[in-house]
């Protein structure tokens, strides 16, 4: 691998380029009209213009990405997260073009990307799943039968969905009759498939995910992350280890994640996501993300393993550089997503020019961003300004360090979520680690 094209933008593009540079690999950026002066373009060794500001006409156009690779002589493509990262057809197109794809096989992406098929694979691998249809439902009668067996309330989920999107809740039979056709229509519009499946709603759930890694032969986990601080199913704060997860559940959850990765012959970095029900002590598989996650830095902080660097190594044909016995976790790490949104206006995006943009530093503090002062926050893309990551010898120190770090954040020109996430950190539920996925939505902070 000599020259890597990063098919993404923002902080993750910069993160990948840093890993490439440390390994003597040249980095190629792609950029849209809105990103002409973006940091990821300035950071790269080369850059190629790929189209208008709208992602659908630039970052989501496979042909434009492949042409940029041909134009620059890139021999590998890293998709980052979002955009084309979980498109099996794009992965196959990269491979067919004779380039190295930094990610799992198109077959694994396809199988895990279809949530219903992923559930079937999980069941076959002995991974606990949420009671439900166990696959797509074709008719109302099938949906009603699955819901009765699973017990109401149930969730109607788009088989091709993800990221918390494509979900409707039915509290009873009447609601299911009403919601099913709406859910199918929404799934078709959003994901190109109207396939949906039925699952029991897990109440008071905690969202816990396990980082896995494979080289096609060897499969390991790097511990779990607690991701339950969410708003509208979008993560706001992540931490590792999960503060109130029983050790027996932690071990079984990690074992299950590795079993699923092995079952699909996984290559590269992936995340297996679960819901944990504290009232019963049970956990259930919900999906597998076949890419690097936004929150991967906290795993890097406690394990000392460069996940993106390992992605590049495995994609180049090398075996995993570590075994399960080599993975040890030390201390506690927390990540806060700093977004350009106005909490006082229902978190409406706040694009504009960053007339002042200071991020925190100091001992055991990491700030990952795709912006510097003077840059413009575009209305066309995700509103995340930066990820602030801290490490502490224990959770108490990590929380204290994050509070200090947030106090050093100084942003002018756009509204941010800094004060809001600070309130979350100070809340009784977060301090005690008892929060769940609905904590933010039902709280008055």
Image (cartoon, rainbow, N blue to C red):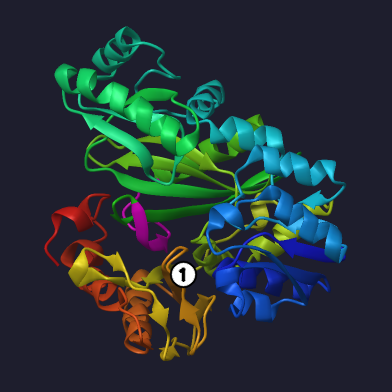
Report the front residue among 176 and 108. 176
- Report whether residue 218 is seen: no
Instruction: Indicate whether residue 6 is drawn in magenta.
Output: no
- Report whether residue 414 is seen: yes
Residue 316 drawn at (x, y percent)? 83, 54
In-image side of 226 versus 254 (left or right):
left
At 68% from the left and 80% from the top, the residue drawn is 43
Magenta stretch, residue numbers: 234-247
Task: Name above or below for residue 139 compared with residue 323.
Answer: above
* Disc 1 secondary structure class: loop
Task: Name above or below for residue 241 compared with residue 209.
Answer: below
Considering every residue shown, the one lying at the far left of the view is 444
Residue 321 drawn at (x, y percent)? 76, 57
Report the front residue among 51 and 442. 51
Badge 1 density bin: few <14, some 14–19, many ≥20, Cα 10 Å: some
Instruction: Indicate whether residue 241 is drawn in magenta.
Output: yes
**Residue indicated by mark 1:** 331
At 41% from the left and 28% from the top, the residue drawn is 129
Q: Toward which corner of the image does residue 184 lie, by quadrant? A: top left
Question: Which image quarter holds the N terminus?
Answer: bottom right
At 30% from the left and 7% from the top, the residue drawn is 141
């Amino acid at each position: 691998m000599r020259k890597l094209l990063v098919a993404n933008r923002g902080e993750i593009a910069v993160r990948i380029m840093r890993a490439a540079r440390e390994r003597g690999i040249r980095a190629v950026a792609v950029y849209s009209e809105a990103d002409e002066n973006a940091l990821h373009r300035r950071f790269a060794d080369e850059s190629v213009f790929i189209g208008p500001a709208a992602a659908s006409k630039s970052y989501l156009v496979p042909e434009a990405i492949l042409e940029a690779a041909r134009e620059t002589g890139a021999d590998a493509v890293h998709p980052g997260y979002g955009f084309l990262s979980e498109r099996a057809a794009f992965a196959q197109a990269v491979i067919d073009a004779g380039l190295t794809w930094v990610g799992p096989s198109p077959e694994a992406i396809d199988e895990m990307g279809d949530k219903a098929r992923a559930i079937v694979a999980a069941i076959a691998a002995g991974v606990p799943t949420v009671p439900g249809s166990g696959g797509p439902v074709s008719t109302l009668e099938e949906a009603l039968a699955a819901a009765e067996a699973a017990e109401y309330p149930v969730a109607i989920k788009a088989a091709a969905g993800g990221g918390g999107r494509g979900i409707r809740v039915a509290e009873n039979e009447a609601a299911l009759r009403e919601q099913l056709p709406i859910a199918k229509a929404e799934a078709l519009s959003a994901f190109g498939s109207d396939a949906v499946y039925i699952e029991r709603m897990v109440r008071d759930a905690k969202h816990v995910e396990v980082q896995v890694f494979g080289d096609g032969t060897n499969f390991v986990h790097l511990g779990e992350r607690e991701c339950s601080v969410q708003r509208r199913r979008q993560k706001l704060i992540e931490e590792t280890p999960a503060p109130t997860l029983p050790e027996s559940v932690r071990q079984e959850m990690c074992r299950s994640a590795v079993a699923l990765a092995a079952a699909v012959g996984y290559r590269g970095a992936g995340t297996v996501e679960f819901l944990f029900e504290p009232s019963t002590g049970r956990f259930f598989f919900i999906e597998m993300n076949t890419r690097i996650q936004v929150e991967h830095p906290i795993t890097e902080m406690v394990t000392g393993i460069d996940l993106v660097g390992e992605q590049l190594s495995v994609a180049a044909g090398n075996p995993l550089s570590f075994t399960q016995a080599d993975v040890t976790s030390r201390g506690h790490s927390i990540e806060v997503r700093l977004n350009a949104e106005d909490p006082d206006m229902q978190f409406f995006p706040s694009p504009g020019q960053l007339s002042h943009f200071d991020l925190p530093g100091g001992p055991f503090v990491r700030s990952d961003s795709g912006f510097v002062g003077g840059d413009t926050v575009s209305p066309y893309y995700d509103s995340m300004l930066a990820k602030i990551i801290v490490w502490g010898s224990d959770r108490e120190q990590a929380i204290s360090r994050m509070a200090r770090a947030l106090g050093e954040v100084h942003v002018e020109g756009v509204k941010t979520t800094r004060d809001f996430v600070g309130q979350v950190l100070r809340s009784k539920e977060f301090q005690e680690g008892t929060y769940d996925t609905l904590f933010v939505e039902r709280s008055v902070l």
